[in-house]
Image (cartoon, rainbow, N blue to C red):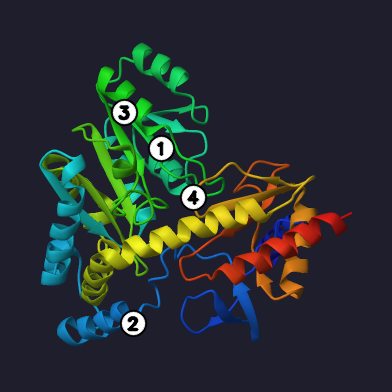
Amino acid sequence: MDLIATIDRQLDTLAARSLTRRRRITDGACAPRQLVDGRDLLAFCSNDYLGLAAHPQVIEALREGAQLYGAGSGASHLVSGHSRAHHLLEETLAEWMAPHLEDARALTLCTGYMANLAILSALGVDADAMIFSEALNHASLIDGARLAKAGVTVYPHGDVETLTQLLAASSASTKIVVTDSVFSMDGDLAPLPALLAACERHGAWLVVDDAHGFGVLGQNGRGALEHFGLRSTNLIYMGTLGKAAGVGGAFVAAHASVIELLIQRARPYIYTTACPPALAHALLASLAIMGGDEGAERRAHLARLVEQLRGSLRLERWELAASTTPIQPVIIGSNDAALHAASRLHEQGLWVPAIRPPTVAPGTARLRVTLSAAHATDDVARLAQALNELEKAAP
């Protein structure tokens, strides 16, 4: 019982600091309007940026995939779990990224978290390697760096000058710069062109986690590399398939030799059961939508919603972060104030999560608003009015 008492004290400490997290139970498909804990809510919290999670064609492809391949893969990719669907998906993703990577090849994994662990642990396998990690990187990149044997240096957010100095001074055998493209709690973009130039100048890899850019950024939805018009053999690209793509999983795209190294060395890939082939089959349908006229229309609608929200908010004490992406954080400050604001919105039938430390820095607790192409202009107008009125009434 002393063991349980220790855990209970830790939980009490979290509660006293307003840091307790809770899960909500949703019924039905991922969509702006959901039944949540038995109540109808208008949600602004998913990463389903293009509204494809409940798209009829994607759902039908998932059903078809289950009929073709069954419910599970049965083993890891390197044993017997690598299906024709996985192969076709990887080929398609390699074609998508070919304009930005020499001799492009793609590798699919079950989650973005696993993909980042795989990249950094495989590249940073030697103790004389060095990982240069962005200060606001996602937890999966931080944990990937911890898993690697390489040393780790953290550079300030968006600070290319400091990073360049660190690269110039480093004698590491392998230099690995790693960054989010779109920062998940702020919505801003990393200065990828300048980062890539520094990496090319100093012989470093640039690992780009484009979890929140793939499908959204770029004329054809091919992500941050297309958005900035980048191409280099120094690039290693990670994109997730459960956000804008609407299904699940992730992929790494890079030069074929890099991908072969991951297949041979990356433990998070080698030692895990492959994702169900039906998901890969559904993702082929999702990519077809993303890369076609409908995908372009959905991205255009999403961009208009972002402009609408930013133009409608009249905040004086709270701060709307400088973001042009579907992630539109409203920074409030204290944990209690953010929780109070989220609770008041919930009372009005609006689901917007309060984000608190350690996910964000102390004193910057916020409402993380995320927009989807499945939202209507009336939905955004309702949210903007609620936020404006809530700020005025806040203590």
Identify the residue under disc 3. 196
Residue type, mark 3 in image: Leu
Measuring 14% from the left and 67% from the top, which residue is drawn there? 82
Label drawn at residue 179 = 1
Which residue is disc 2 drawn over? 56
x and y percentages locating residue 278 in the rendered image: 23, 77
Q: CA distance from mark 4 to mark 3?
A: 21 Å
- Tell me the amino acid under the disc marked 4: Thr
Q: Nearer the viewer, mark 3 or mark 1?
A: 3
Q: Amino acid at mark 2?
A: Pro
Can you tell which quarter of the image residue 343 is in? bottom right
Quarter of the picture holding the N terminus: bottom right
* Residue occupied by mark 4: 325
The residue under the point 76% across, 58% down is 388
Q: In whole angstroms, how far apart are the C-alphas of marks 4 and 2?
A: 26 Å
What secondary structure is found at the residue carrying circle 4? Answer: loop
Which of marks 2 and 4 precedes in the sequence? 2
SS type, badge 2: helix
Q: Residues within 10 Å of mark 4 (few under 14, many from 20)?
A: many
Image quarter (top left, top right, bottom left or bottom right) of the C terminus? bottom right
